[in-house]
């Protein structure tokens, strides 16, 4: 397919989107993605790994997410298209790196949808009914639990099927509820019981050491939660003023979520009964099925427990609905990158919804639900896959500054040359903190997607394929090297202990910087970037032409008004 054909087809599909989302709606999208099932389970899971130091894990996670998000806000404002997160690597490095980044990002996001449904059903299992308690066996959903979660997946699907305007109205209302309930929960638990001795006793502030704090960032659902900052970027094709609204939405959603999550973590740590901690043997063995609701019941806050049971549907459902929307835009982006059949790039003209992509994501969500039936197992996979997808942002943003300095950048940070390498180091560290063998398993999942890339790319002539392979080699090498370092790393991170504590962190940081440099230097002006530049130039020219036509129309109107005034003056003079 020629560049011109691809460009025209892409422009045609995007013309069916409705640019109706402002800063508030996009912030609600980001915040609604961040505050999903993570707030229902994240506090307990983070405490189980890091103890009271889980508070710091949420702060570290927010700093990492915000640093990486800054690189993506510039990219999102440059290319305000649906499914933006799966496109940036393709613009800077061509098909191989672009596909690997898109595959990792899609796996991370699409698996959130069944994760949210699983969270709702897991909370339901605490209801005092036999049929409800039979939905979850303490580790994963039972057959009946999977059936109920499947109904929720279909519900998310149909909420997105009809129109983006319905999505925006529904999501904003749900997000308000999702923000109010966590704040109310944290406040109520703090007032009911605030036992500061929980921080000093049972192993102290860091019962499992500082390495556990870092692992909590990667494994407890913290990365899962903050990953929601991507949603406004993936909805960029529907943003009214993406240059201003996208960066604001991303930053606002992360900062607001940080405040809420820290409050919830503090409330959870102080509300756990000391006797419960003593009998369980510490934070790692509490074993709550519905952590916050169980604590509410323990302190006689039955009204709060009922509210939490209701919100266990609203919060995950709101996030599931958002991710069903954003992943459908990602699928369209992958198709326009040239790695899926054309049908998945179709957008319904009446509703502005990419319906075939919605259907594909529903099928994949069912598949994940069948294989991974517990929230914890899904959270771990989502988190590590998310981090792999993060590494392209820092590399792509500086690559495009080198390759296409004249492209319009509504958002351009002067400190980006400093932020980008730091973001690459942060992403590499979180990937390492994910612990072996999980890091190896998720990197293996990345390899599973390569046959799809090969189907579309290996049929091309070698001269055409070679620069894509050369430009993408850094990312393949990066994944292999990180898998080896994870395997050889410290025992506290699941490795064999060949790297001494402290030095392993230094090694990973150096690896991040080396591959950042390689990635930026290996970028090239590939056909996708050239098409994007042509499209941007055409948009600028069209805007200038429209302004010129508007100016002429205003001048003509002013001339006619002046003529009528002069004619009237002559008539008045003749009459007198």
Image: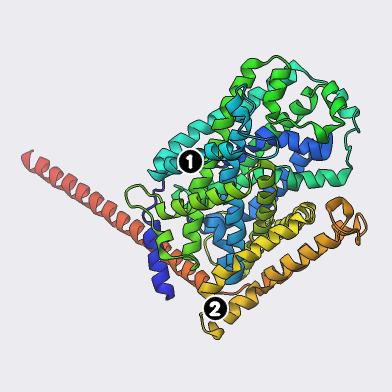
CB-based contact (under 8 Å), mark 1 and mark 2: no
Which picture quadrant has residue 216? top right
Q: Residue 409 bears which disc, if any?
A: none
The C terminus sits in image quarter? top left
* Residue situated in front as seen by the camera: 179 or 488: 488
Assign the N terminus to one quadrant of the image: bottom left
Of the image marks 1 and 2, the number of the one nearer the N terminus: 1
- Pick the front one: 502 or 548: 502
Badge 1, how many Cα within 10 Å: few under 14, some, many 20+? many
Residue 127, above or below 451: above
What residue sits 70% from the left and 14% below the top? 300
- Label 2: which secondary element: loop
Image height check: is 287 above or below 532?
above
Relative depth, front residue between 62 and 552: 62
The local crowd at label 2, few if under 14, some if 14 to 19, many if 20 or more residues have their Cα within 10 Å, is: few
* Image location of residue 334, percent across then percent down: 51, 62
Reading the image, the residue beneath label 2 is: 458
Q: Is 102 left, or right, of 80 in this rendering?
A: right
Residue positioned 65% across, 62% down in the render: 446
Q: In this figure, which residue is indicated by the disc labeled 1?
A: 156
């Amino acid at each position: 397919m020629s560049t011109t054909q691809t460009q025209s087809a892409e422009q045609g599909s995007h013309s069916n989107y409705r640019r109706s989302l402002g800063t508030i709606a996009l912030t609600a999208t980001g915040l609604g993605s961040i505050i999903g099932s993570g707030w229902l389970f994240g506090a307990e899971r983070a405490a189980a790994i890091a103890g009271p130091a889980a508070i710091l894990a949420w702060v570290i996670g927010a700093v990492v997410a915000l640093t990486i998000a800054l690189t993506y806000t510039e990219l999102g404002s440059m290319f305000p298209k649906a499914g933006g997160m799966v496109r940036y690597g393709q613009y800077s490095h061509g098909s191989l790196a672009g596909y690997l980044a898109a595959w990792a990002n899609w796996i991370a996001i699409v698996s959130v949808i069944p994760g949210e449904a699983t969270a709702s059903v897991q909370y339901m299992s605490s209801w005092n009914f036999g049929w409800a308690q039979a939905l979850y066996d303490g580790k994963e959903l039972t057959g009946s639990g999977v059936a109920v979660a499947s109904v929720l997946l279909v519900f998310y699907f149909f909420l997105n099927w009809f129109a983006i305007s319905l999505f925006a109205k529904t999501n904003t209302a749900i997000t308000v509820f999702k923000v109010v309930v966590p704040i109310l929960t944290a406040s109520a638990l703090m007032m009911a019981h605030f036992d500061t001795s929980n921080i000093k006793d049972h192993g102290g502030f860091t019962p499992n050491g500082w390495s556990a704090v870092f692992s909590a960032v990667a494994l407890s659902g913290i990365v899962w939660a903050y990953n929601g900052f991507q949603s406004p970027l993936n909805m960029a094709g529907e943003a009214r003023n993406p240059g201003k609204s996208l960066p604001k939405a991303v930053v606002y959603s992360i900062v607001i979520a940080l405040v809420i999550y820290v409050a919830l973590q503090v409330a959870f740590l102080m509300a756990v009964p000391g006797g419960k901690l003593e009998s369980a043997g510490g934070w790692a063995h509490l074993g709550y099925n519905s952590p916050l609701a169980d604590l509410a019941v323990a302190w006689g806050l039955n009204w709060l427990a009922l509210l939490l049971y209701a919100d266990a549907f609203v919060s995950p459902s709101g996030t599931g609905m958002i991710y069903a929307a954003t992943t459908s835009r990602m699928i369209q982006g992958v198709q326009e990158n040239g790695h899926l059949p054309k049908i998945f790039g179709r957008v319904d003209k009446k509703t502005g919804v990419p319906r075939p992509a919605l259907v594909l994501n529903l099928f994949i969500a069912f598949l994940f639900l069948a294989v991974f039936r517990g929230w914890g197992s899904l959270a771990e996979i989502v988190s590590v896959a998310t981090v792999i997808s993060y590494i392209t942002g820092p590399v792509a943003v500086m690559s495009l500054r080198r390759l296409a300095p004249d492209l319009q950048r509504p958002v351009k940070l002067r400190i980006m040359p400093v932020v980008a390498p730091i973001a690459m180091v942060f992403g590499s560290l979180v990937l390492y903190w994910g612990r072996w063998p999980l890091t190896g398993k998720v990197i293996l999942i990345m390899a599973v997607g390569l046959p799809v890339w090969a189907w579309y790319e290996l049929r091309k002539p070698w001269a055409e394929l070679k620069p894509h392979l050369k430009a993408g080699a850094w990312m393949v090498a990066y994944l292999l090297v990180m898998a080896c370092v994870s395997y050889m790393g410290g025992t506290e991170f699941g490795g064999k202990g060949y790297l001494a504590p402290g030095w392993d962190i230094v090694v990973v940081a150096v690896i991040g910087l080396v591959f950042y440099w390689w990635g930026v230097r290996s970028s090239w002006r590939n056909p996708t970037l050239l098409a994007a530049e042509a499209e941007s130039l055409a948009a600028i020219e069209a805007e200038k032409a429209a302004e010129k036509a508007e100016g002429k129309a205003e001048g003509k109107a002013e001339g006619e008004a002046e003529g009528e005034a002069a004619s009237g003056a002559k008539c008045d003079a003749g009459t007198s």
